[in-house]
């Protein structure tokens, strides 16, 4: 038994200090015997209004991640989950692999990242042509597109919401998210992929799948699915998309 509330597994979840959505989405799934311990990456200046600002935000993430990992490790987790997606796409496939290796070397634990989770999810669902959206600036969207292209997917469309601050990501309403999906969707896209873990999209993605008749992957659902399945936990979850419900 790992502990009384996490007797099946405890996941260490590394999140920016500005993020209010990741932990909510994970706990909302209500998986018996799974517990989470968050380590927070301190973001003193959350502005991300242009490409330069976004690079500065990533610099803050990189400067504080070791402390966040240190804090999460005190709960003796069984797996580390990176609850911030942009850094895991940076540098393409090799950049993500290098990030995962650094986190594994630092913790000695298996690692789940947003980039790897989305790749595994799309392969599981049999989708190769994808349309992608984010809350990011163009510099980050290019890195996301690079990752998916290098991973063997065809990106039919990619764009971002251009949120001015990290906190504003969590303030995007459903109608704006619906409009974004409508903007990028096409007959060519076999799946819609959302990145940016502070976007509250899990419940809406589940509804959109039924409406559009194709997979709509919310990154928080993908990382939770990956962490669970890689850990040998196969509970099926309703209300978080077909990935967690059927796979």
Image: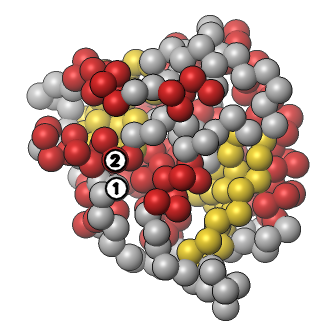
Mark linked to residue 240: 1
Residue 89 coordinates in the image, percent (x, y): 57, 35
| Contact (Cβ within 8 Å) of mark 1 with mark 2 | yes
- Secondary element at tag 2: helix
* Residue sitting nearer the eye, 154 or 231: 231
Label 1: how many residues lie within 10 Å, few (<14), some (14-19) or many (20+)? many
Q: Position of residue 25 (x, y in %)?
A: 49, 53
Between 114 and 28, the one nearer to me in the picture: 28
Residue 203's tag is 2
Q: Residue at x 14, y 38 (%)?
A: 212
* Quarter occupied by the C terminus: bottom left
Taking the image as shown, residue 74 lies to the left or right of residue 30, namely right
Expressed as whole percent of the image width and height from the top left, the position of residue 110 reads 65, 66
Q: How many marks?
A: 2
Label 1, secondary structure: give it. Answer: loop
Q: Would residue 140 be visible to someone looking at this image?
A: yes
């Amino acid at each position: 038994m790992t502990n009384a509330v996490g007797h099946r597994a405890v996941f260490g979840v590394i999140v920016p200090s500005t993020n209010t959505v990741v932990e909510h989405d994970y706990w909302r799934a209500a998986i018996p015997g799974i517990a989470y311990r968050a380590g927070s990456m301190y973001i003193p200046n959350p502005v991300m209004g242009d490409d330069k600002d976004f690079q500065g935000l990533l610099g803050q993430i990189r400067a504080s991640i070791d402390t966040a990992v240190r804090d999460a490790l005190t709960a003796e987790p069984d797996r580390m989950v990176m609850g911030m997606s942009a850094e895991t796409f940076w540098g393409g496939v090799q950049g993500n692999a290098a990030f995962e290796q650094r986190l594994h070397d630092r913790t000695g634990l298996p690692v789940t990242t947003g980039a790897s989770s989305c790749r595994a999810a799309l392969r599981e669902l049999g989708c190769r042509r994808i349309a992608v959206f984010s809350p990011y600036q163009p510099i980050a969207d290019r890195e996301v597109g690079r990752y998916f292209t290098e991973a063997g997917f065809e990106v039919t469309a990619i764009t971002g919401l251009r949120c001015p601050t990290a906190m504003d990501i969590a303030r995007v309403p459903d109608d704006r998210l619906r409009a974004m999906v409508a903007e990028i969707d096409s007959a060519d896209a076999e799946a819609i992929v959302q990145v940016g873990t502070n976007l509250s999209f899990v419940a809406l993605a589940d509804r959109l799948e039924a409406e559009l008749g194709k997979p709509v992957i919310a990154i928080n659902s993908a990382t939770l699915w990956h962490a669970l399945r890689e850990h040998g936990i196969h509970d099926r979850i309703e209300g978080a998309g077909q990935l967690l419900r059927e796979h």
